[in-house]
Every structure is written in C-alpha cells, then in structure tokens.
Image: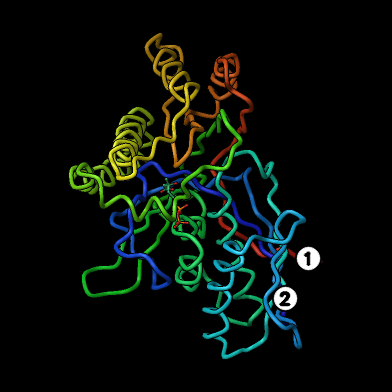
C-alpha cells in the first residue's frame, strides 16, 4: 500500500492564531492557543503515491503544477513522513479543492490536513489525528485544527517542550452552526499569513492581545459547551478585531480590509440590533468576512448580506466532520 487518498474540511477560528515564536522549518510554535470550528463544505481531496524510481516530489493543485513555495511546504510534510517511515521514495501528490480556487479563501488548512492523512496512510504509518499533528504543522499552522471535526483547540507546547496539543472540544453533533463565507475579493493577498506571523512581534499591540487570549479561549470553550451563540459571538468579534489591530500596527502595517469588509461588519451589527438575527462576524488574514449564525437563521442572513454592494459570493458552510480516507483516488 503506497497510495492513499484523504478528504479534509477547512476551519474557521473563533480565537485566532496570529504570530509564531520563530520562523523556519523547525516545528512551528504559535504565540497563543486558538480554537476553531471545522467546516464541512470547503474541502480538499488529496491523493499521495510514493513511487519507486521518481526523481523528485511532484505536486499538482487543481490541475496545475504547484508553485515553488507550495512544493517546498508539501516537501516538508513528505520529508517528515519519509523520516518516520524510514523510506526514501519520492511522492506524486494530486490535490483538488471543491471551492473556487480564486475564491480568496484559505485552502492551506484543509490542504495540509488531507496531505498529512493521505501521506501517513500511503507510507504505512499510524494515522490517528495525534500522529498527524507534527507533519500537518510543517505545512501550515491552522491545518492541525482541521485534523479533527467539530470544535477544536490548539495549545502551543508547554515551556521546554516541542509538541503542540490539539484536541476536539466538542463534536459536530453537539452544536451545528452555520458559517456564511462572504467573499468581497478574490485577489491573492499581498502578504501571506506565513509572513504576517513573523511580523506580529513588531506590533506594540501584540502584548495586549496575548494578555487577553487565554481568557477568551476559556469563554469560547464555555460558550460551545453551553451552546451560547451570543457569548461565542461577542468573544469571537473582539478577538478578530484585536488580531486585525495587531496586523494594522505591525511594521510594515498589514491592512487586509476593503470597503465591503466594513459594510458587512456594519450589516451584521444592524441585523443584531434590530433583534431580528443573531449573527456575528470574524475575519482571517484577508478582506472576506465569516458570518456565524444558527442553521435556522442562515438563509435570512444570507439574503440580507447578499444585497450589500461589493459582495461577490457567499459560500454557505456548516460545522464539519473529521478528515477521512477515501476509496477513490485522484490518479
Ligand atoms: C488569520 O495557518 O494560514 O487565519 O501557519 O503560515 O500556514 P501558516 O498560517 P495559517 O494562519 C492562519 C491565520 C488566521 C487565523 C487562524 O486561522 O487561526
């Protein structure tokens, strides 16, 4: 068995990961814990085959050869798997996202979760989520949270340790929620998250944000436990704004928002004020807005938000399952 295929969903963080302890290929250590919801509808499927005689790793993403940077990240994950398996074979990797490539939403979380699972299985290694945390992290930080379904907590290593801890806080069935991914721009962001994480330390606001994060994690865990959307939403919005304050006050400054980003925020606040719709926003390293609401109110919220000038598309997502192995290969 040297070939395997896996599918994984992306995730949206309620308390964000922003900033790393140091750069480079060493195990990536975030400055703060983060907590997220896995998404069902925005997924990556990846097939990995370790092929005898191949002269190097090959990676095709959505039908096109990958860029040098993408291939380098994929190579880091494959190297970790090869090292563990005591194997030298190079791999052919074919990956496809089920959402529009240029939708302006991150595919690294679902992509590297699917890659870690497929590569471990193809190499004959154990492939339970804890076995996959380290390889997934060599691709992308947020990928380790996509190794589980439902609600997921990522804790940085304790002092003097190297391993992060990732665990499911609650399964999907505990509290199904909706995430409307409001696309206001499909353009590639100018500064990738990987570079942004290194700039976080240049912000004088970083310390203030970090001082609040632990408390927010505890409040979000409790809100999930109690299925309290209002409590979750208030913490989630505060955390997104504080992360963007850090971004905006870095050197160089990172301003990801566009006019329509603010228009969506204002709409979400207005919908709430009218007491009609309980919905809350969060924003990753880009201009698009995620609107979290109950499944019953998702349609009404979507119809309101669709009318905003500058909104190009809305992807309607829900709480997702853990990654899984698939029988059908991509090649
Ligand atoms: C703003 O996981 O994309 O979405 O580790 O460099 O791949 P790398 O970064 P990435 O960073 C995610 C940042 C964020 C917040 C979050 O998802 O927690």
Q: Nearer the viewer, residue 26 or 126?
A: 26
- Relative image position of residue 16 (x, y in whole percent): 36, 46
Q: Nearer the viewer, residue 321 or 94?
A: 94
Residue at x 58%, y 50% (from the top left corner): 107
- Pick the quarter of the image with the N terminus: bottom right
Ligand 1 within 8 Å, label 1 CB: no
Q: Is residue 175 left or right of residue 305?
A: left
Quick check: can you spot residue 328?
no
Rendered view: 293 above or below 323 = above
Q: Is residue 194 left or right of residue 121?
A: left
**Around disc 2, counting alpha carbons within 10 Å, would you say few (fewer than 14), some (14 to 19), or many (20 or more)?**
many
**Around disc 1, counting alpha carbons within 10 Å, would you say few (fewer than 14), some (14 to 19), or many (20 or more)?**
some
Quick check: can you spot residue 202?
yes
Rendered view: 104 above or below 126 = above
> Which residue carries the number 1 mark?
329
Disc number at residue 49? 2
Gap between marks 2 and 1, in whole Å? Answer: 10 Å
Q: Quadrant of residue 215?
A: top left
Residue at x 39%, y 62% (from the top left corner): 166
Front position among marks 2 and 1: 2
Rendered view: 43 above or below 82 = above
Residue at far top of view: 274
Q: Quadrant of residue 162?
A: bottom left
Q: Secondary structure at mark 2?
A: strand
- Relative image position of residue 21 (x, y in whole percent): 29, 62
- Relative image position of residue 61 (x, y in whole percent): 70, 58
């Amino acid at each position: 068995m040297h070939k395997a295929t896996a599918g994984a969903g992306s995730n949206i963080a309620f308390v964000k990961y922003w900033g790393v302890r140091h750069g480079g290929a060493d195990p990536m250590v975030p400055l703060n814990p983060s907590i997220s919801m896995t998404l069902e509808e925005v997924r990556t499927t990846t097939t990995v085959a370790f092929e005898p005689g191949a002269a190097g790793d090959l990676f095709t993403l959505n039908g096109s050869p990958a860029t040098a940077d993408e291939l380098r990240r994929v190579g880091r994950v494959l190297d970790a798997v090869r090292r563990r398996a005591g194997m030298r074979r190079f791999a052919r990797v074919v990956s496809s996202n089920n959402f529009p490539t240029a939708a302006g939403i991150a595919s690294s979380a679902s992509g590297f979760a699917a890659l870690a699972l497929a590569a471990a299985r193809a190499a004959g290694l154990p492939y339970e989520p804890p076995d996959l945390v380290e390889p997934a992290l060599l691709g992308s930080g947020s990928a380790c949270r996509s190794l589980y379904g439902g609600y997921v907590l990522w804790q940085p290593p304790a002092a003097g340790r190297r391993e992060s801890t990732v665990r499911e806080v609650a399964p999907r069935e505990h509290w199904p929620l909706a995430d409307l991914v409001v696309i206001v721009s499909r353009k590639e962001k100018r500064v990738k998250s990987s570079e942004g994480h290194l700039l976080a330390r240049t912000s004088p606001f970083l310390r203030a944000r970090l001082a609040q994060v632990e408390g927010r994690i505890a409040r979000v865990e409790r809100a999930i436990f109690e299925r309290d959307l209002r409590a979750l939403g208030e913490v989630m919005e505060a955390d997104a704004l504080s992360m963007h304050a850090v971004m905006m006050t870095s050197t160089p400054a990172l301003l990801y928002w566009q006019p329509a980003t603010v228009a969506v925020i204002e709409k979400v606040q207005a919908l709430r004020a009218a007491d009609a719709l309980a919905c809350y926003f969060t924003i990753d390293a880009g201009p698009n807005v995620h609107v979290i609401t109950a499944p019953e109110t998702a349609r009404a919220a979507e119809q309101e938000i669709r009318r905003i000038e500058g909104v190009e598309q809305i992807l309607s997502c829900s709480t997702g399952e853990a990654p899984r192995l698939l029988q059908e290969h991509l090649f």
